[in-house]
Amino acid sequence: MTVPIASPLAGWATPLDKVPDPVFSDRMLGDGIAIDPVEGQLTAPGNGVVTNIHPAGHAVTLTLDSGPVLLMHIGLDTVGLGGAGFSPLVTEGQRVAAGDTLIRFDLDQLARTARSLITPVIVTNGEAFRIVSRTGEGVVAPGAPLLTLEAVATGEPAKYRATTSGPQIEQTIALPLAQGLHARPAARIAKLASDFDADIALCAEGGHSASARSSVAMLGLALTHGASVSLRATGPDAGAAVNAIVALIESGMGELLPVGTAVAQPRPVPALPDTLTGVVAAPGMAIGPAFRLNTEAIAVPETGENPAGETRKLEAAKAQVRAALETEAAGDGPQAEIAAAHGALLDDPTLDEAARSVIAAGKSAGFAWRQAIDRAARPLRSTGNKRFAERLDDLADLEHRVQVALLGEAAQPTRPPEGAILVAETLYPSQLMALADAGLSGIATAQGGATSHVAIIAAGLGLPLLAALGPALGLVEDGTDLILTDGTLHIAPGKVAIDRARAASAARAARRRAARARADESAVTTDGTRIEVVANLGSVADAQSAVSEGAEGCGLLRTEFLFLDRAAPPDEAEQRATYQQIADTLGERPLIVRTLDIGADKPAPWLPMADEENPALGLRGIRLQLARRDLLETQFRALLGVEARGRLRIMLPMVAAADELREAHALLHRLAGERGVSAPELGIMVETPAAALTAETLAREAVFFSIGSNDLSQYALARDRTNPAVAAGLDGLHPAVLRLIDATVRGGRAHDRWTGVCGGLAAVPEAVPILIGLGVTELSVPAAAVAEIKALIRTLDLNYCRTLAARALTATDAAAVRALVEPLLEQAA
């Protein structure tokens, strides 16, 4: 197989031998060609993914879809310019197409400041591809043929076959290179490492590591001056290799800048905190001893025996994991759906191709699988998006399961004591499933989030999960008493607090049993006012649960569940079939469908979106729908085809202005006319202060309001609800939020429009009397909360709730509002 490489620059092509730098002319980084540029634009020579972009902006590594890994280094000694004159337009992990601009650079400025503008284009994975032809010396245009590569036959022996037997030698130093670890010193380290019979790795503080034999891998560590780096080696020459490489680095290689040293002070032992706050990923309360789950990294040898044998090993391990996933996927519920998704990911052709190419280069099956997973993870990791970052756990889980299968036997997990709270840095779906019947009472993790697959599984198992608790969770030891409730983990709280928590938990369980006995009855206040209690849904299974829990309908169908975690959006037929199934499940109960609300913390892989400084204030909700009318039109058409026995309404998310509502209204009525059916009633979610304060204007167009208290609270209080550092202070009972709800109800009432609440506040017992007192007539809550909210409403007097609400609007803060309500709730209990 031959692979053409296009020129990334306009300029004069010249052989590497003429580059006045031995790192390139001696091919320490690999073979290639050089170009003296005449235009200040570096473009992609093919389709691929940006593997590394140097912090100084002068060099970029691109992994082409066809396999070659290319380093393009603009100028010589340009790392010392500190980025001056360079403007990178891509980020690590970003996918690019041939001809896309990677870096813009100022030719005039660099001509004055750089030693040379000559730009080497290097094939860094020469063990997998060799150059069979290259353009002659002379003028070359961007996109013109530059090199032709040929894949190295897979049967060729690897150049290096170290043994990993023997002890590991390790030494840590502070990097004394003035410009950090860039191409020249990386090449010299790689050349020296090749002289030793040892597996050698450079390890950065964050846990990332790179083979000392790979210049490109070391560049990916982005080590700056003064960075702490550990040299680790195994094999016959391990000690000599570490000593030699440390000596080379400490020599400075012509760039020595000593790192300031100070007398090492003993680190103070951090105190165990009394509480930690995090993100509620699965609701509930848990009391029990800590059970630590420590996931140790599986060590894998880098080099393999032979490509054919390593390929067979990998296929056998994947077959074992595939069989386990098929068994898990044969069940019901979210666990089965996630197992099916993992099965599809396991057989992803891109992963398979990446692993095979690494094996072909002489690497082991385990090393190849780890590299393939890492390559797939880079684009997700580089987005900085929380939801995409949570999907990294799925890849890590697959990597771990296959590595365990390659070992030949899996160590049985230690069984936790009955009622324990599992404590872990992070938790993989397969690990949680293995402990599903272990009698856990809850889960606390340092990382993770509310939309991870582990969170979905935990909710399905009825296990409270508190995520994103931070590194301090690592101080919690096995057996420590814990209380997990309301976004807070109480650590070693003492016997009195534990007894009080157990009593409160028992009382709540008794109230829940009593409430469920009357779940099918209406929620009517003591003075005869009926409040509709409906459920928030996110799947067909949720609809079934809502009916069994006594919900009077659906106040919010989150249609995102159809659009996320897939390669393409659902078409009209798939959407209609799902909506119809939910409507059939609800029977004559009403159904309110929220149109697609993605963007911000809910990105979709199939919908590329430009990076936004503040995505919560960017292109999301109705703004995105109007920007992508094809999505909104398809969803409207699907909903117009649903034959519901109950009333079907449609609700638009994140509306902030009347013109947004009018545009959607016009589109819906045009499509309904084309189909010859009546358009469903169209309402809006009130999630922004702008919508709340202009509710009277919006009520001229919207048939109803439903308050999304989660977003309304975060916008009103300027606290990101997905950020654990500030989310703990986010309280929908803050008087500022309550005044916005009051404004919404009054604005709707001016045009005889009803107002509901479908955010988390609707299920907070302290909030229910206030919301009813403000004039809210519908509460949409999780299905599991329906019976208890109904039971609470039956104890309330509407006139007293109105008095309470009026006082709450003038309270000083959320704590004062809760103090107002507390006596009423005690009486109700």
Image (cartoon, rainbow, N blue to C red):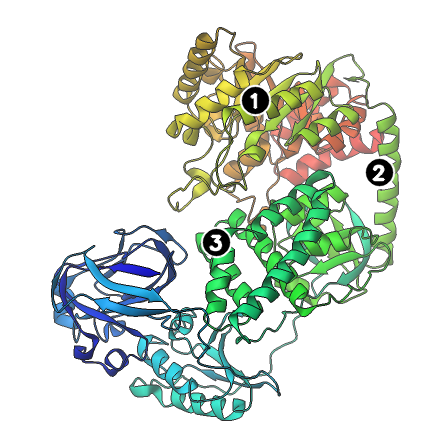
Q: In terms of sequence position, does the residue under pointer 3 or pointer 2 come before the other?
A: 3
The three-letter amino acid code for the residue at tag 1 is Arg
Q: Residues within 10 Å of mark 3 (few under 14, many from 20)?
A: some
For the residues bearing labels 3 and 1, Cβ distance under 8 angstroms: no
Foreground pick, 521 / 728: 521
Q: Residue at x 78, y 23 (%)?
A: 550
Sequence-first tag of 3 and 1: 3
Asked if 461 appears above or below 177 in the picture, the reply is above
Numbered label attached to residue 576: 1
Disc 3/disc 1 C-alpha distance (Å): 32 Å
Left or right: residue 399 versus residue 652 is right
* Residue wearing tag 2: 508
**Is label 3 or label 1 in front?**
3
Looking at the rendered image, the quarter that the N terminus falls into is bottom left
> Quarter of the image holding residue 797?
top right
Q: Residue at x 35, y 83 (%)?
A: 188
- At label 2, the amino acid type is Arg
Quarter the C terminus occupies: top right
Mark 1, other Cα within 10 Å: few <14 / some 14–19 / many ≥20: many
Tag of residue 350 = 3
